[in-house]
Amino acid sequence: MDLSLNGVSVTAAGRKLIDDVTLEARQGQFVGLLGPNGSGKSTTLRAVCQVLKPSAGAVLVDGQPVDGMAPRKRARAIAAVAQEAHAEFDFTVAEVVAMGRMPHHGLLDRMSAADHRLCAEALAQVGLTHLSDRGVLTLSGGERQRVLIARALAQQPRILVLDEPTNHLDIRHQLEVLALARTSGPTVLAALHDLNLAAAVCDVVHVLDAGRLVASGTPAEVLTPALLADVFGVRGHVVPHPATGRPQLLFDLLESQEDTHA
């Protein structure tokens, strides 16, 4: 399933949070949204999920406007994992993951054996089967993040939207979660803070700066020293990964910043 943003802008309190963003995530791709803090990554993802309504432009799934979809149909197409998800009720891990099946049933329908199997498989994929009976409020931030990813996988979406999915995760689980998202089947659009993780996993990256799209392409095409200086304000050194050949980045301060702090 293809996802397209055509000239999408979002305005709040008279201020444009993103301005005329056009990008595409094609069937099966892992597409990264990159940019410094406040660049509009999370706003863009919220527009995709219709949490924020675009003030201009359109979000399309296989050419169909998302804002015209019934909520249940939209939830079967798109699953999202937010950057910060606050649990107020102490549901068990199994109960939270089971919520991913809700778009596939009527309000009063009971979980089927197939539903329970899908939820169990999703928990196993994120390595949390042993915590299925634990309350989510007792979990660490990293464990809770993996529960939310399991819930999204149980939803069986065609498009998976991830906002900083590696928050709170140690390096092993960062790599495992991104590898799982990449191989689980859906088209993935993910806001990523770590540029090296983005370079390792993404097919295509789009870079936002001050709410506008400033670069798009493969990680090798986009993550250049010039862009790192212009957008992120750092001096970047790009080297090939010894095993994969993908670009890996080393950073230090620009000379002007070094002079300022001298």
Image: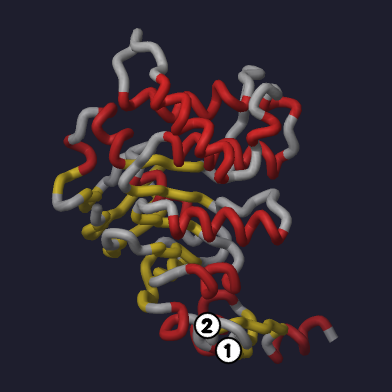
Within-10-Å neighbours for mark 1: few <14, some 14–19, many 20+: few
For the residues marked 2 and 1, what is the alpha-carbon distance in whole angstroms? 5 Å
Within-10-Å neighbours for mark 2: few <14, some 14–19, many 20+: some
Numbered disc 1: secondary structure:
strand
Question: Going by the image, does 220 lie left or right of 14?
Answer: right
User: Considering only vertical position in the picture, is 230 above or below 158?
Assistant: below
The way the protein has been coloured in the rendering is secondary structure
Q: Which mark is residue 240?
A: 1
Query: Mark 2 is on which residue type?
Result: Arg
Residue at x 51% of width, y 39% of height: 122
Residue at x 49% of width, y 61% of height: 39
Q: Are marks 2 and 1 in contact (CB under 8 Å)?
A: yes
Query: Mark 1 is on which residue type?
Result: Pro
Residue 124 occupies quadrant? top right
User: Considering only vertical position in the picture, is 37 above or below 60?
Assistant: below
Q: Nearer the viewer, residue 71 or 180?
A: 180
Q: Nearer the viewer, residue 107 or 243?
A: 243
Which residue appears farthest toward the left when viewing the image?
A: 63
Residue at x 45% of width, y 69% of height: 202
Numbered disc 2: secondary structure:
loop
Residue 173 occupies quadrant? bottom right
Q: Which residue is labeled 2 in the image?
A: 246
Residue at x 60% of width, y 73% of height: 196
Q: Which mark is residue 192?
A: none
Q: Residue 243 in the image: x percent, y percent?
A: 60, 84
User: Considering only vertical position in the picture, is 138 above or below 229?
Assistant: above
